[in-house]
Amino acid sequence: MKFTSDPTSGTLVCTAASGSRDLTLFQVRTYQAVLMLTWIRFDAPLPWTNLTLDVWFAHAIHGIESRSDAQYSFCCLPGGVIAIQTNNLAVLDKSLPLWESVRWLAALFIHEARHNEGFGHTCATGPRAGQNDNTVAELGAWGVQYYFYVWLAEHTDHGVVPKADQAIARAEAADMLGRFFCQPEPTPSA
């Protein structure tokens, strides 16, 4: 991970003196999002890979760089590194519950990683032409982000992801259908 831009720089929330590393809020949330991919286990295979989420992610990209010189996060910088824009990240909103902000950033990482596997946005019509996927079933960047939320809602243990958080993930997936797909019907396996 490379923190070229860090909107929380100068303020440490973890310190070496306390037994951690010196980390800003943005750095902590970034590490938490990546760690989330390693500790979430699902009771069914992901629709886009036979690998576990963390193994898939590690194969899909080769790094994460935070940047302030981009309007949007994107894939990819040379070498398969995803670029995360830092100008308006919800993960820095301290009014959001920790689970929501970290889940949101993990979903962004998954979305951008899918682009590195050759999946661009395929919807060519409407006000978000070139920014949306045509269908969920094509399993593009928005499709895998949709299924990440569905799998958090439907395929995790309540001891790991509490029912209230599963409900939030379920609502997030439902909201995505009308916003990020030209043809928003989910596949029957959802």
Image (tube, rainbow, N blue to C red):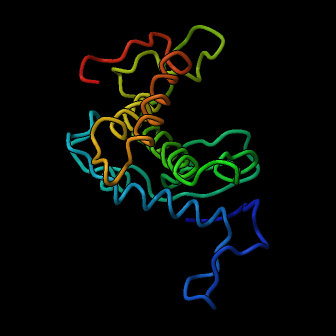
39 or 183, nearer to the observer: 39
Q: Residue at the far bottom: name it.
A: 17
| Tally of marks | 0
Can you name the residue that lies furthest to the right here?
A: 10
Does residue 178 appear left or right of residue 5 in this picture? left
Picture quadrant where residue 153 is located: top left
Determine whether 109 is above or below 126 in the image.
below
Residue 146: name its quadrant. top left
- Choose between 144 and 82: the one closer to the eye: 144
Task: Report the residue at 55% width, 48% height from top.
Answer: 105
- Left or right placement of residue 36 versus residue 190 in this view: right
What x and y, as percent, mark residue 33?
A: 49, 56
Is 9 placed left or right of 62 in the picture?
right
Q: Quadrant of the N terminus?
A: bottom right
Q: Residue 31 location, x and y as percent?
A: 52, 64
- Left or right of 171 in this view: 187: left
- Give the residue drawn at x 55%, y 88%: 19
Residue shown at the point (52%, 51%) measured from the top left? 99
Q: Is residue 16 above or below residue 154?
A: below
| Front residue of 111 and 80 | 111
Q: Where residue 5 appears, x then y in whole percent?
A: 73, 60
The spot of residue 93 in percent (x, y) is 70, 50
What is the quadrant of the C terminus in the image?
Answer: top left
Residue at image position (56%, 19%) is 179
Query: 49 or 172: nearer the eye?
Result: 172
